[in-house]
Image (spheres, grey):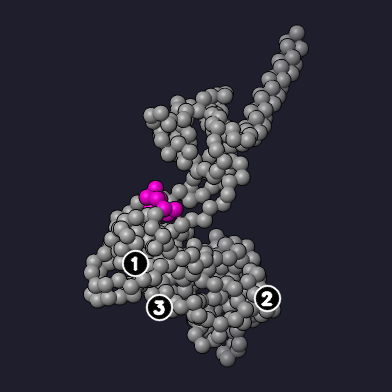
Amino acid sequence: MGRRWKKNFAYFSIFLLLVQLFSFHAIVRADENVQSPVVNGNDVTFRYVGTGVEQSVLLAGSFNDWKTDGDKKIELTKESDRIWSVTKTLPDGTYMYKFVVDGNWVTDSLNANQADDGYGGKNSVVVVGQPVEQQRTVTLVGNLQDEFGHTSEWDPKATATVMTHEGDGLYTFTGTLPAGTYEYKIAINGSWDENYGAGGRGGNNISLTLQQETKVTFYYNDRTHAIADSTWYTPISKEKQPRLVGTILPAIGYEKEVDGWTPETSTAFFADDNFDSIYTFSARVPKGTYEYKVVLGNNWSENYPQDNAKLNVLEETTITFFFDAKTKSVYTDYSPTGSDGSVQKDRLKHNTWDSLYRQPFGAVKAGESVTLRLAAKKKKAI
C-alpha cells in the first residue's frame, strides 16, 4: 500500500504542476491578447495591464484637457485582477494620452504609437476616424509683432509673424527691428496651449536688445524646440551645408557613387538642431572598417579633419557623427561594448618559457636576431 500511495502521490503532484503551468500559460496568453486602444468607429476602449496591486488608474489626454479631477476626470474600472479598462466616444481626430496609475503618469505599454510630450518624454497616440492632417503653424510672438506689421503684440493668432518652414523641423522668420529691447516666444497652431521660450515648453520670454535698426532672423526647431536669433547665432550657409563623404557612404545608402568620395552627390547632410554650432548626422552603420571626412559644400575647398577619420564598427549599430563648426573637430558617439580593435594592454602576455613566444629559443648569440611574440586578447600569439 505504501508503494502504491507514493506512486499515486507522484502522479497527483505531476498533475498539479501541469495545471499550474497551463494556468500560467493561459494568463500569459490572455495578456498577450489584450489590446489598447481598440477603435470601433468613434468608440475607443483603453486598457491598462497592471500587476494586481494598483489602487487607481485614470486616463488623461488631449480629449479631456489632461484633467485628473473634476467633471473631466476619466476612471478605468477593473476587467480582472490585472486589467483595467474604459470606453470613450471621441470625434474624429488624433489624440495624445497617458494613464495615471496611483498618481504616476505612464504611457500605454500596449500602444507603440507615440509622440514627444514636449517635456523630454512621450505620449501615447490614438487616431479616431480619418482626420485631415493639419500642418503645424509656428508663430513668432512678443512685443515686436507690431514692428512686423501686426496690429497688436503677444498674439499667437497673428499671420504677419508666421514663420517659414525650411524643412526637417526648421522654421525661420526675418524682419527689420528698430533699436530697442524686445521679448519674444514661439507659439504653435495659433494658441498659447503649446508655446516655447527660454528653457523649453512654457519657458520664460527671450530677451533681445538692439543698439540700432537691425535685420534679425529668428530660428526655431520643432524637433528639439530650440530657439535662436541672429544677434548671437549664425548658421553655416546652405551652400556650405556639411555633408559626410568616404567609404562609409555606400554602406549606409547615402551615396550612389561606388567609393563614396564625391561631395556633390552625398546626401548625408548634417544639421544644427540645437543651434549650438554642433552639427550632427545619424545613420545605421553595418559592421566594417571605414574612412570618412566632413565636407562643407559640394566641393573639396573645405573639409575636415586633415587626414581621413577612421571608424571600426564591430557590429551594426546607429552612430551619430558630429562636426563642431567653431573648432572644426569631427567625432562620433560610437562606443562598442566589446573591443574596437585597439590593443588592450591588460590582455597582453609574453611567456619567456614558451618557444612560441621567442625564436630562437634558449641562449642567444651576440648579434643574433630574435623574434618576440605577444599574446593578445584571444590568447593568440602575434
Magenta segment main secondary structure: strand
Task: Give the farthest residue toward the front.
Answer: 151
x, y percent for residue 360:
64, 81
x, y percent for residue 150:
34, 62
Looking at the image, residue 93 sits to the left or right of residue 146; the answer is right
To which residue does mark 1 refer? Answer: 148
To which residue does mark 2 refer? Answer: 256
Residues 198 and 19: in front is 198
Label 1 environment density (alpha carbons within 10 Å; few <14, some 14–19, many ≥20): few
Residue 345 makes an appearance in the image:
no
Q: Indicate whether residue 193 is drawn in magenta.
A: yes
Mark 1 vs mark 3, CA separation in Å = 36 Å
Identify the mark nearer the N-term, 2 or 1.
Answer: 1
Q: Secondary structure at mark 2?
A: loop
Residue positioned 53% across, 52% down in the render? 134
Residue positioned 68% across, 79% down in the render? 257
Determine whether label 2 and label 1 are within 8 Å by CB: no
Mark 3 vs mark 2, CA separation in Å = 30 Å
Q: Quadrant of residue 160?
A: bottom left
The segment highlighted magenta reads: 188-195
To which residue does mark 3 refer? Answer: 327
